[in-house]
Every structure is written in structure tokens, then in C-alpha cells.
Image: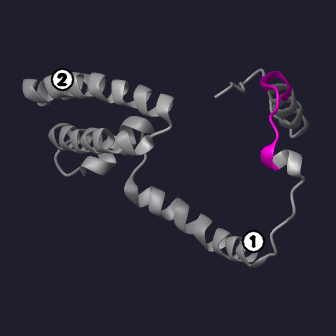
């Protein structure tokens, strides 16, 4: 039902803009990534965010905010109110921990960790070893290179 509602509520001009901006955004992202120039991608990203907000305004049911509509598309049943509750609980516990970390003296790192180069296969093996040691279940999840 939601897919149908989205399809009939979105004007053709927004659908066309989504397709055009999606292609433009992907090309800009690829170029920015290759050149390590994320600031060149920022204007396109801003356009994409604005477009998603506009699309959400068109698709949200009456009485549902565009933000709640987008949250629900990502995590069924999630609302801004519930997120505020969740992050409020986290904040009360994390703020003192972060303050303690920021007040601590910086640790000295071995020079090899700061400027060394490491084989990707060795890094992947190390990450898998650490993940397995922490109890990560590779039967129900995965660890990919990024």
C-alpha cells in the first residue's frame, strides 16, 4: 500500500528530478571519491537531501511529518519521538564518558601505526580475528572491505 501511495502522490516532475539528480549525484560522488575532494560533492548532496524532503512532504500521510515518513521507510515504526527517547538515554550515559576521554592525556602510538602501510589481506584477517574474538557470528552477519 505504501508503495502505491508513494507512486500516486509523487508528481511526475519530482520523479524526473529524482532520476536526473540520482545520476548527477552518483557521477559527482565517483569523481569526488577519486579526487579525495568531498567538498565538490557537497552541493549535489544538499540538492539530494532537499529533494528527499520535498518528496517526503508529498508522500507522508496526513498528520505524519516528512521526517517521520522518512524514518519509517528506513526503520518500520520508528518516529522522531522514539529516536529522541533512545538517544536521550544514550546521551545521559555517554556525555560523562566522552568528557573523561577528552580530559585524558593523549596516548603515544607506535610510529608504524601512524605512518605505516599495511597489506589489505592482513588487515582483513586481523579484523576477522578481532571480530570473531568478540563473538561476532559470521553465519548471521558479514565483514566486508570498504
Quadrant of res 17:
top left
Mark 2 and mark 1 in contact (Cβ < 8 Å)?
no
- Residue 120 lies in the magenta-colored region: yes
Q: How many marks?
A: 2
3, above or below 88, in the image: above
- Residue 38 within the magenta-colored segment of the rendering: no
Cα distance in 3D space between marks 1 and 2: 49 Å
Secondary structure found at label 1: helix
Seen in the picture, residue 145 relative to 58 is either above or below; the reply is above
Q: Say which residue appears at 54% left-offset and 62% top-offset.
A: 87
Magenta stretch: give its range: 114-122
- Measured from the top left, where is residue 137 in percent x and y? 80, 28
Q: Residue 131: which quarter of the image? A: top right
Is residue 64 positioned above or below 104 on the image?
above
Q: Nearer the viewer, residue 109 or 79?
A: 109
Snapshot quadrant of residue 61: top left
Q: Residues within 10 Å of mark 2 (few under 14, many from 20)?
A: few
Q: Quadrant of the N terminus?
A: top left
**Between 30 and 23, which is closer to the camera in this rendering?**
30
* Residue at image mark 1: 101
Badge 2 is on which residue? 7
Amino acid at each position: 500500500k505504501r508503495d502505491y501511495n508513494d507512486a500516486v502522490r509523487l508528481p511526475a516532475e519530482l520523479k524526473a528530478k529524482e532520476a536526473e539528480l540520482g545520476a548527477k549525484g552518483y557521477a559527482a560522488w565517483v569523481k569526488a571519491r577519486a579526487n579525495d575532494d568531498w567538498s565538490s560533492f557537497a552541493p549535489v548532496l544538499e540538492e539530494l537531501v532537499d529533494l528527499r524532503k520535498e518528496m517526503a512532504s508529498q508522500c507522508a500521510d496526513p498528520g505524519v511529518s516528512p521526517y517521520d515518513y522518512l524514518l519509517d521507510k528506513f526503520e518500520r515504526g520508528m518516529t522522531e519521538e522514539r529516536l529522541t527517547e533512545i538517544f536521550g538515554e544514550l546521551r545521559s550515559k555517554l556525555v560523562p564518558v566522552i568528557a573523561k576521554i577528552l580530559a585524558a592525556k593523549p596516548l603515544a602510538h607506535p610510529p608504524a601505526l601512524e605512518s605505516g602501510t599495511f597489506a589489505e589481506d592482513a588487515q582483513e584477517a586481523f579484523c576477522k580475528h578481532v571480530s570473531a574474538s568478540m563473538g561476532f557470528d559470521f553465519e548471521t552477519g558479514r565483514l566486508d572491505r570498504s
